Image (cartoon, helix red, strand yellow):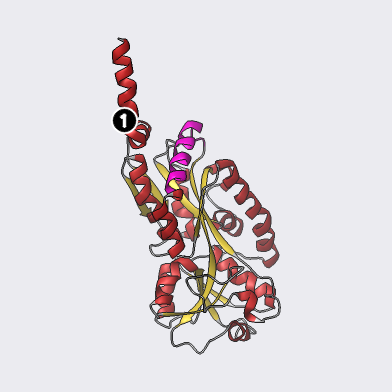
Amino acid sequence: MRLIAVLTALFGLALGPATAFAQTFDKPIKIMAPYAPGGNIDVTARIIADKLREVLGVSVIVENKAGASGMIGSDVVARSAPDGTSLLVSANSLVAVPAIYGNAPYDWRTAFTPITHIQRVPAVLVVPANSPIKTMADFIALGKDGQFAVADSGLGTTNHLAVELIAEATGTKYTSVHYKGSGAAMIDVMAGQVPAQVDQLNAAIGNIKSGKLRAIAVSSDKRVPQLPDVPTMKESGVKGLENFTFATFTGLFGPAKMPPDVVAKINEAMVKVLKDPAVVARFAELTAEAYPTTPQETAAMFEAEDRTVVPLIKKLQIKPE
């Protein structure tokens, strides 16, 4: 009997971490990206899903369910069983959107279980390749009468709020054109149907490098190595933007009341995912910084966002249109 016990223990060690995880997760895991394909949230979800599949040893799929600036897909996860098989990738907008709509189907503080931070990425102002807009000063000059249109990925998303923050800092006003994801917005901007867009840099960089979009400025503290010729907004010389920085950060969530051991297992797996050299390199290619956090640290980040963003929304009286 002792020999059998020893052999069983050794066999368990030999199976490796994927099998150990599979003993907890024996059903496919669905990661909800609550926006249309092609944007920051979708890209992020697919990068982590590929590696999470390897680490957990189970099927991990990404589902897109756009609408109501991410609330429809997020609500699907909030109503799911808290067994770790239904997860949500969301950004700062998880806090902002309910504050704007006022009738959100969930309270983000109580509807979700924070698991880990995933990545953060600066915003970029882009225009069609043939646009006469060359600099941030050109863009600001067009915002004097509130008629100039700027596309974003949805009401209350970080892209939308970045435009509002730029406008507030420079005393300008723009007409926001809200889409169900930045991918759809980008298509119209490239076609010249909307003259500008603020988007996460990781979602836009491919079209910038291919010449389909022109990057005017990035919202990072320093220029990004992947686009060394694109200035920061701080460097623009525009009054009000001397210290302007902005970033979108994404996190992984599950439904409320997830068992602590399940949260710990997924967090442990995500640490492996986000420290994998291939994942780190992939996010770096997209100008994003990958790093994991504890569930407690993740919750604190979103609570800090609530203290910053919600007062801005109230001050600007941003409401559904």
Q: Is residue 4 left or right of residue 38?
A: left
Screen quadrant of the N terminus: top left
Q: Is residue 8 magenta?
A: no
Task: Residue type at mark 1: give it.
Answer: Ala
Judged from this view, the residue extending furthest toward the bottom is 132
**Is 39 in front, or is 272?**
272
**Is 119 in front, or is 139?**
119
Find residue 36 and report its horizontal and vertical position in percent.
40, 62
Helix, strand or loop status at disc 1 = helix
Find residue 67 and report its horizontal and vertical position in percent.
44, 60
Screen quadrant of the C terminus: bottom right
Judged from this view, the residue extending furthest toward the top is 1
Is the magenta region chiefly helix, strand or loop?
Answer: helix
Find residue 158 and report its horizontal and vertical position in percent.
55, 63
- Neighbour tally class for label 1: few under 14, some 14-19, many 20 plus, Cα within 10 Å: few
Instruction: Residue 158: tell me if it is visible.
Output: yes
Q: Is residue 169 left or right of residue 25?
A: right
Query: Which residue is at a point 51% across and 46% down the rendered structure image?
Result: 116
Query: Which residue is at a point 67% across and 67% down the rendered structure image?
Result: 316
Query: Which residue is at a point 70% across and 76% down the rendered structure image?
Result: 240
What residue would you read off at disc 1? Answer: 14
Q: Is residue 110 above or below residue 152?
A: above
Q: Is residue 178 left or right of residue 220?
A: left
Q: Is residue 278 above or below residue 241?
A: above
**Is 128 in front, or is 245?**
245
**Is 42 in front, or is 268?**
268
Query: Which residues, given as a range, are shown in magenta?
Result: 257-273
Q: Is residue 263 magenta?
A: yes
Instruction: Residue 22: tell me if it is visible.
Output: no
Find residue 236 and report its horizontal and vertical position in percent.
63, 80
How many numbered discs sit on the rendered protein?
1
